Amino acid sequence: MGRQVGNRAELEKHIPAMLLHEGTWEGTYRFVDLEGNVTDQYSSHIQCVFPDDGPWVYVQKNHYAWPDGRVFETEFGGELRGNRIWWDTDRFHGYGWATHDDIVLLTLDRKDNPGESFSEMILMAPDGVHRARTWHWFRDGKLFQRTLCDERRV
């Protein structure tokens, strides 16, 4: 019997750019309306984990904190199907992939807010320490806000 290939090897084969995001990231999320006004802002602590064994090829652990003391935490996993990672959580479902230039793209539909979806682009800085994430939110097919995430690896 041959050795089974682990999750990390499969991810390296199909979406190697994802592994560039492994680790812990801290930053700020800013939500802006179509006029550019900030409608929400909070700090983030995100862990991107790529377990070699188990059902998930990718696990993300999020901790968000608002200036008024509110906190929200969540954790979710994604499975590899071909050249995409698929998520199906209580809040959203959809998939992510990477371009040949290592830009990670996601398309997600909100389950907790029917009719809402967003597309996300994640760009890693050449230093591998900073990354930028931009989300474009749609409600019933119309753009209504954007999220800007500035993060650094800690």
Image: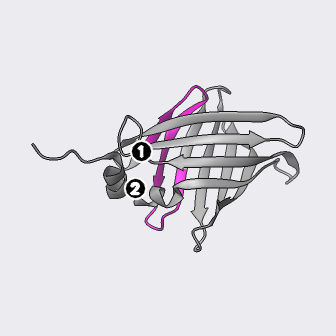
Q: Can I make out residue 125 in this image?
A: yes
Rendered view: 110 above or below 143: above
Mark 1 or mark 2, earlier in chain: 2
Instruction: Give the extent of the magenta segment.
Output: 85-105
| Camera-nearest residue between 107 and 148 | 148
Element marked by disc 1: loop
**Quarter of the image where one finds residue 85:** top left
Rendered view: 125 above or below 23: below
Instruction: Classify 10 Å Cα crowding around label 1: few (below 14), some (14-19), many (20 and above).
Output: some
Relative side of 25 to 65, left or right: left
The residue at the far front in this view is: 154
Location of residue 110 in the rendering, given as x and y in whole percent from the top left corner? 62, 32
State the predominant SS element of the stretch in magenta. Answer: strand
Location of residue 145 in the rendering, given as x and y in whole percent from the top left corner? 76, 45
**Quarter of the image where one finds residue 121:** bottom right
**Quarter of the image where one finds residue 13:** bottom left
Q: Quadrant of the C terminus?
A: bottom right
Identify the disc placed on residue 15: 2
Residue ID for mark 1 = 51
**How many numbered discs, if any?**
2
| Camera-nearest residue between 93 and 27 | 27
